[in-house]
Amino acid sequence: MTIKQLSIFLENKSGTLIKVLDLLKKSNIQLIATTIADTAEYGICRIICSEPARAYLELQEGGVAVALTDVFAIELDNIPGAGADAIQAFSECGISIPYLYSFLTGKKAILIFRTDNNDQAREVIAKNNLKFVTEADLANWA
């Protein structure tokens, strides 16, 4: 089970990020998690939000270069090493994780990541009794 993530291409200059944030604010879309990976000239802003499909349309209509991608989100106990243990399970099966980010909510940690093999990743999650975070879970947090 995957969730939807917005991937937004941003030029590294003043005003590009606030344009995205203002469009989402005006659309009353709640951000749940955000990360930005950058190079000297451009960055990719990744966002998990309350209504990804609507956010995608609003951003597109606003002239923003955006893609909607599938990522995994799993819930872990907020204890040292829980993330390392989860990632180890994927590594042992030869699954590559090109990027990962996380956030805390109460006594839980949420790991959001993309893999090179979604089918095998689902098997690892089930086999290791890891808990999928669903779109419904995200809506409850927003």
Image: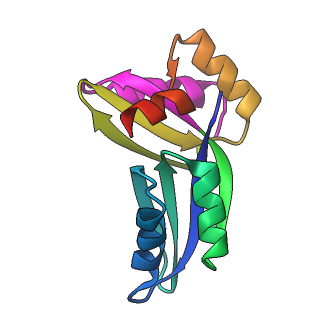
Whether 74 is among the magenta residues is: yes
Q: Which residue is at the front of the view, 71 or 117?
A: 71
Instruction: Please say if 65 is above or below 139.
Output: below
State which quarter of the image contains the C terminus. Answer: top left
Q: In which quarter of the image is residue 80?
A: top left
Q: Nearer the viewer, residue 23 or 75?
A: 23
Residue at 42% of width from left, 69% of height from top? 21
Q: Quadrant of the N terminus?
A: top right
The percent position of residue 69, horizontal first and vertical second, equals 67, 50
* Horizontal arrangement in the rendering, residue 40 relative to residue 54 (left or right): left
* Vertical relation: 76 (above or below) 62: above
Q: Which residue is drawn at 44% across and 67% down?
A: 26
- Residue range highlighted in magenta: 72-96
Report x, y in % for residue 133. 50, 27
Is residue 121 found left or right of 43 in the rendered image? right
Rendered position, 13 above or below 42 = below
